[in-house]
Every structure is written in C-alpha cells, then in structure tokens.
Image (tube, rainbow, N blue to C red):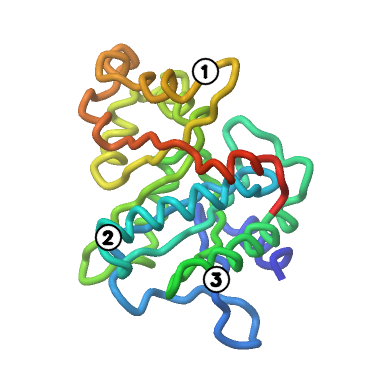
Amino acid sequence: SFSRALTSFQSSRDPFRILCTLPHLSSDAPSPRRPVRPVRDLVILDSSFNPPTLAHAGMARSALRDLGAKNNEEGKRLMLLLSVNNADKAPKPASFPVRLCMMEAMGRELLDEVEGLEIDVAVTTMPFFHDKARATTETDFYACEGQQPTMTFLAGFDTLVRIFNPKYYGEGMQRALGPFFEESRVRITTRPDETWGGTREQRAWLTAERLGDFGGDEAWTGRVEVVEGEKGDEEGRGDWW
C-alpha cells in the first residue's frame, strides 16, 4: 500500500523514490517499471497540490498533447511527484497516503486519454524544482545510453513567482538554477486572480530585465513557457479528481 511504501521512503535517506508505474501490469503489488524505449521528454506534474483537481489534470493533458504534436507520440512519459517537505505548504487537509491515492486515480484517468502513456507516481523530500530535477537525474531511472530526458515541470503562476524569489537561494540564484535550466524547462499555466492580474499581465511578468534584477540569467526566459489553462478545466478548477 502507499502507507507502507511511504513509511519505507521516509525512514530512508533517499531524496527521491518512484513508488509505482501506471498502468499496473499484474495483480502483484504495484512497483516501478523502467522505460522500455528511450524517454525524450519527461513531464513532471509537481503534485503537492491538495487535492488534485480537473485543472491539474488539464495541465498534464495539454502538455502531453503539445509535446506529441512537436515530437510525435513516442518518447514522452509523465511523473506525478509528491514532495513530503514542501517549502511553503503544510500537509493538510489530506494525509500523504491519501494524496498518493488521489494522484494515482488521476493518473488512471489520464491513461485512458493518452494512448501508450506510462505514468510514474513518485515522492521526494526535496522542496525546490532544481533539487527535484537533480534527485531524479541521479537515480538514472530514465537514462538511456547515457542520455537523460528533458524534464518539463508543470506549475501554476504562483509557483513561477516563487521560483524566481531570491529569498530561496542563499548561494545565489544562478548557482542554483543555472544547472537546472540547462537540462529542464518550466511550463506555467496562468491563474488569473486579484494579486497577479489576468492572463495578459501574467504572460508579461517574466522579462529578461526582471530576471536580471532578481540575480538570474536573462536567457532563462527561453526555458519558461506560459500557457493559458483550458477553459473547461478552469471552470472545474476546484472540483476534486
């Protein structure tokens, strides 16, 4: 069960672990399954959200669809990743095992929509994207002939603001995020609200000048894609999966 798997992970010193791969191929206990074919694009839905909603599923669906349009249907894989040490959010209202069950349920629905897709359900102790990317790479789970896939992290606009907040980078933003953006991308879905404005304002927020002011590299703007949420998913944003 996820409770036992999570207890095992939390009692270890591992920073990252894949708990299972969907679809399950037998009636045995769910387990990770290494890719049979090379993975070019690894889409990572950071599943610290609580609980998953239709909007979260829509973020994954649209990213996989757009990757399929660019690179055909082969070579992509989805990871649903739960951080048990979130930088800003306490683990409430649902416990971590319950959240993992909800993530798995969402994954099963996505399997029905994307032919041939495999989805990994994983956990990490790392709170930041650059640490999560490094921990994932160090497992070599997705490596093929020494090549690692390009990781695309999915997030909402509020997360984009946190990614480029200098307070998280005592060693300097370029030192932390430079290696991350060499290998990874970030795909941001707009979330119009009173704090950050509408879609137009959110699309215009990340500029080379602003990144420079924050202590970042202006070239990183080319590694961040900002997209609008799908209309139906936005309307169902608060609905539980």
Mark 2, Cα crowd under 10 Å, few <14 / some 14-19 / many 20+, is: some
Instruction: Estimate the x, y position of residue 13 in percent, counting from the top left.
Output: 55, 55
Q: Residue at x 38, y 19 (%)?
A: 205
* Residue marked by disc 1: 196
Residue situated in front as seen by the camera: 129 or 203: 203
**Left or right of residue 200: residue 125:** right
Amino acid beneath label 1? Trp
Marker disc for residue 148: 2
Instruction: Estimate the x, y position of residue 44 in percent, counting from the top left.
Output: 45, 52
Looking at the image, is mark 1 or mark 3 nearer the viewer? Answer: 3
Residue situated in front as seen by the camera: 71 or 220: 71
Marker disc for residue 112: 3
Marker disc for residue 175: none
Q: Name the secondary structure under disc 1.
A: loop
**Left or right of residue 197: residue 64:** left
Label 2 and label 3: CA atoms lie apart by 27 Å
Instruction: Estimate the x, y position of residue 199 in percent, counting from the top left.
Output: 46, 25
Label 1 and label 2: CA atoms lie apart by 35 Å
